[in-house]
């Protein structure tokens, strides 16, 4: 699914209004009704509701929501910050439609700020996608006042004070919403870790914006949904044999870190690879054969670290490298040999990335391969350098993908996938239970298995990251966030595949 900019969203509004020959206030009514349906499903009318409106259409939404909630027996107080004379046409339209028993109270001074009970519900309809400068003055004081109340804040479309799709100056005041309910499509701002405190949990409600406009809109920003994933998963013909599903090689493991190799190997098998061979240091040979009997094992001549490559490396159709591997000199030499000789697609994780990050020569050799890199933010920083903020980090990532013609899976609370063509895909599955050792090794195994099965590198990244997070979401009710471990993701991977297959049937 596409992520549209603020300007594109405004254009989508205009296109929809014209295409359907409706008035703009009718589209606002759709937005307000969709928000109200979400709100009504979340909160019963037992708590007082305080709605704060700005002078634009975000505020217009707020007035329409006031009317709709009042009709549904919520106790609502509504406040306007800003000059009503400058209000938008649709704001004025909804102002006139306010029930007479509801007074629109003007906030002109800090003394007009209402005391907000901790148990109250606040709806932020000050600014949405029309924010065009840093919030200062009375608006800033009001935002700080709302943030300081213990009330649960739900933002309409955007948390006020946050830009939709570009870096928000840090000195501005920004609403810290517990929920953000946006219209039709999520905004880029929702996917950046630095905004989590402002956006809270984001939800999207449909308002039937023109599908024609959306399908024709150009963007390089996407987020993955179950619908997007459905057509990716390949079906398996009845007369299958393991040769059809690739033979992967994993180069991984090291003294004290053989668990990473076991996790990557188990995940690779569970993700459907036909055959798997794991090449690990000698100390890992028995561990692997005992822990992952489904995989074949090769023992490096070196006892504790990977120092050599298998002599028949050309027989594998994908090579996953890095989990638990370490950055010993002998291993660096092996990685240099791998990049200089192998022709297969590579999935490089963890210490394989750290080794490459330390050598311009190795980095330049990435250009000669089909490569997926799966760094976490620290490994990413070692590879590309420190970015000023999350927006710049995404641009830096795309620049690297383009320059080295590679794919990057930047792991995080909403993993981002960069492609050599300059596209960005944000994942939408997963949870905080995944913040535990070994989940990265599991992802490497999954992506390696998908490349072995002839998914394109882009498909393997998008599908692998989605399934990895979905497995964690399926595990959550049984194991919880605190007790979740990387092995749970492997154990629930079958269910994740089955769920995607069921929806694609
Ligand atoms: N398709 C949709 O998503 C729909 C969204 N709707 C709602 O419309 C708003 C966008 O409305 P718009 O009038 O363009 O902008 P805002 O209401 O966000 O604010 C504009 C208003 O505020 C002034 N302003 C901007 N920045 C500041 C600032 N820092 N300080 C003071 N004043 C500021 C600006 O000059 C304008 O006067 C969208 O978010 C949705 O909520 C539609 O309801 C339906 C379709
Ligand atoms: K808002």
Image (spheres, rainbow, N blue to C red):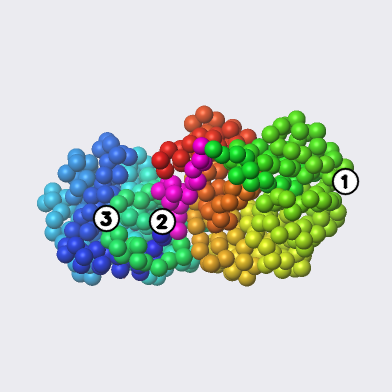
- Provide the secondary structure element on which disc 1 rests: loop
Q: Which region is colored magenta?
A: 222-238
Mark 2 element type: loop
Q: Is residue 276 above or below residue 425?
A: above
Q: Residue visible at 13% across and 59% down?
A: 96
The residue at which mark 3 appears reads as 208
Distance between the Cα atoms at labels 1 and 2?
48 Å
**Disc on the earlier residue, 2 or 3:** 2
Residue at 52%, 49% in the rendered image: 463
In the displayed structure image, the side of residue 271 where residue 502 appears, left or right: left
Q: Which residue is mark 1?
A: 302
Which residue is at 63% across, 54% downward? 374
Q: Is residue 47 visible?
A: no
How many discs appear?
A: 3
Name the one closer to the observer, 489 or 290. Answer: 290
Q: Position of residue 367 (x, y in %)?
A: 67, 67
**Where does label 2 land, which residue?**
1
x, y (%) of residue 188? 44, 60
> Which residue ends up furthest to the left in the rendered image?
100
């Amino acid at each position: 699914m596409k992520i549209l900019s603020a300007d594109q969203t405004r254009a989508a509004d205009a296109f929809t209004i014209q295409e359907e020959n409706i008035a703009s206030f009718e589209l606002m009514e759709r937005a307000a009704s969709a928000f109200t349906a979400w709100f009504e499903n979340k909160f019963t009318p037992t708590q007082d509701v305080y709605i704060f409106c700005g002078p634009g259409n975000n505020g217009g939404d707020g007035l329409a929501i006031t009317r709709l909630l009042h009709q549904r027996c919520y106790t609502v107080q509504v406040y306007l910050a800003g000059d009503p004379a400058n209000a938008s046409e649709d704001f004025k339209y909804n102002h006139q439609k306010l029930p007479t028993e509801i007074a629109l109270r003007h906030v002109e001074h800090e003394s007009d700020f209402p005391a907000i009970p901790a148990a109250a519900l606040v709806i932020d309809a000050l600014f949405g996608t029309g924010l065009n400068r840093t919030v200062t003055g009375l608006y800033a004081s009001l935002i700080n006042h709302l943030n300081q109340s213990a009330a649960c804040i739900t933002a309409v479309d955007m948390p006020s004070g946050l830009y939709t799709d570009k870096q928000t100056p840090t000195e501005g005041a920004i609403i810290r919403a517990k929920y953000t309910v946006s219209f039709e499509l999520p905004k880029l701002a929702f996917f950046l870790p630095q905004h989590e405190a402002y956006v809270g949990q984001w939800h999207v409600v449909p308002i039937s914006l023109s599908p024609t406009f959306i399908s024709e809109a150009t963007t390089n920003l996407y987020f993955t949904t179950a619908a997007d994933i459905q057509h990716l998963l390949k079906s398996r013909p009845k007369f299958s044999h393991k040769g059809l599903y690739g033979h992967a090689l994993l180069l991984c493991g090291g003294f004290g870190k053989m668990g990473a190799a076991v996790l990557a190997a188990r995940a690779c098998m569970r993700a459907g690879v036909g055959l798997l061979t794991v090449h690990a240091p000698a100390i890992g040979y028995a561990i692997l054969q005992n822990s992952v009997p489904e995989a074949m094992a090769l023992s490096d001549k070196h006892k504790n670290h990977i120092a050599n490559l298998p002599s028949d490396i050309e027989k594998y159709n994908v090579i996953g490298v890095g989990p638990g591997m370490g950055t010993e000199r002998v291993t660096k030499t092996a990685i240099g040999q791998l990049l200089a000789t192998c022709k297969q697609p590579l999935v490089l994780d963890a210490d394989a990335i750290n080794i490459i990050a330390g050598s311009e020569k190795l980095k330049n050799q990435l250009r000669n391969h089909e490569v997926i890199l799966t760094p976490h933010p620290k490994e990413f920083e070692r590879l590309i350098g420190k970015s000023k903020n999350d927006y710049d980090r995404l641009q830096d990532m795309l620049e690297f993908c383009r320059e080295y013609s590679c794919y990057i899976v930047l792991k995080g609370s909403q993993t981002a996938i960069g492609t050599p063509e300059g596209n960005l895909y944000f994942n939408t599955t997963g949870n905080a239970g995944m913040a535990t050792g070994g989940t990265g090794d599991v992802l490497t195994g999954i992506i390696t298995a998908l490349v072995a099965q002839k998914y394109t590198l882009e498909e393997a990244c998008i599908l692998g990251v989605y399934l990895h997070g979905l497995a964690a979401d399926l595990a959550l009710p049984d194991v919880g966030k605190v007790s979740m471990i990387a092995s749970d993701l492997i154990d629930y991977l079958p269910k994740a595949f089955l769920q995607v297959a069921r929806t694609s049937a």
